[in-house]
């Protein structure tokens, strides 16, 4: 398994500002994934981050709104830019580990935009 | 990934077995069935996965029908801490680089 931490665990932000979320893994992983979970909804993949290359975004998500960094094999950041109340969600990072196709998730970052 | 269908909610008495069904009638031959759960305010937790044989681990058992069109996750002795949303996901076993597509899941409420 993999142990994943995220910072911050929660935040309250004003509209128009940006927030950068950090994801740290206790082992080296090739792929990291960023998901969003809007209130009362299921998880939706935002993008896949591969170390050393540009992140791959899912339909409906763009780099200008959700820039991602992946400087090494244990760390990634997701920035939520120019926030609006519609961005209020839980943001989760996940990694694959163990070679069996299983993914492990961080505890999430709870974001409220006023 | 094949679409999965789950009941929106279920109740189970503590100490009894919780049997959570999942329909995946369009699953292809190379797609595995994965189960995750999300306890309130936490990230999803991997439970178990299988291809066609029944599987068991320390958390649960997975029963997959012979035609692979449906499966059942069994929590043999449910406790209050098993109250969560359970997600059934069908995905190709392409290693750790494959994304997960979450449906709406089943909200399991374990009661005294």
Image (tube, grey):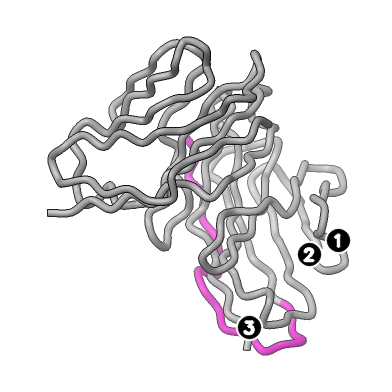
The residue at which mark 1 appears reads as A63
Assign a secondary structure to mark 3: strand
The residue at which mark 2 appears reads as A66
Q: Are marks 2 and 1 in contact (CB under 8 Å)?
A: yes
Label whose residue precedes the other's in the sequence (3 or 2):
2
Q: The C terminus of chain B appears in which quarter of the rendering?
A: bottom left
Neighbour tally class for label 1: few under 14, some 14-19, many 20 plus, Cα within 10 Å: some
Q: Nearer the viewer, residue A106 or A5?
A: A106
Q: Are the residues under badges 3 and 2 in a single subunit?
A: yes
Residue under the image location 44 percent in, 50 percent down: B8
Asked if residue B58 is positioned above or below residue B36 in the image, the reply reads above
Assign a secondary structure to mark 1: loop
Q: CA distance from mark 3 to mark 1?
A: 20 Å
Q: Position of residue B49 (x, y in %)?
A: 47, 25
Q: Are marks 3 and 1 in contact (CB under 8 Å)?
A: no
Range drawn in magenta: A1-18
The residue at which mark 3 appears reads as A113
Q: CA distance from mark 2 to mark 1?
A: 5 Å
Residue under the image location 30 percent in, 30 percent down: B74
Asked if residue A83 is positioned above or below residue A5 in the image, the reply reads below
Q: Describe residue A81's horizontal placement relative to residue A12 as left or right.
A: right
* Magenta stretch encompasses residue A8: yes
Q: CA distance from mark 3 to mark 2?
A: 15 Å
Q: Number of callouts in the render?
A: 3
């Amino acid at each position: 398994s993999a142990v994943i931490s995220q910072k911050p665990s929660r935040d309250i932000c004003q509209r128009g500002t940006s927030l950068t979320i950090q994801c740290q893994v206790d082992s080296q992983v090739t792929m990291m994934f960023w998901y969003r979970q809007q209130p009362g909804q299921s998880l939706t993949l935002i993008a896949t981050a591969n170390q050393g290359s540009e992140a791959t975004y899912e339909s409906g998500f763009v780099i200008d709104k959700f820039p991602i960094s992946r400087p090494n094999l244990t760390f990634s950041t997701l920035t939520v830019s120019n926030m609006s109340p519609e961005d209020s969600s839980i943001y989760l990072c996940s990694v694959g580990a163990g070679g069996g196709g299983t993914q492990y998730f961080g505890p999430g970052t709870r974001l409220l935009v006023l | 990934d094949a679409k999965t269908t789950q009941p929106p909610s279920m109740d189970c008495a503590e100490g009894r077995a919780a049997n959570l069904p999942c329909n995946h009638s369009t699953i292809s031959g190379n797609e595995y069935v994965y189960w995750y759960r999300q306890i309130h305010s936490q990230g999803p937790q991997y439970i178990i996965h299988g291809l066609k044989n029944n599987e068991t681990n320390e958390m649960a058992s997975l029963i997959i029908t012979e035609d692979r069109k449906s499966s059942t996750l069994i929590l043999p002795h449910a406790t209050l801490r098993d109250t969560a949303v359970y997600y059934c996901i069908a995905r190709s076993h392409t290693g750790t680089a494959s994304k997960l597509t979450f449906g709406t899941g089943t909200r399991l409420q374990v009661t005294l």
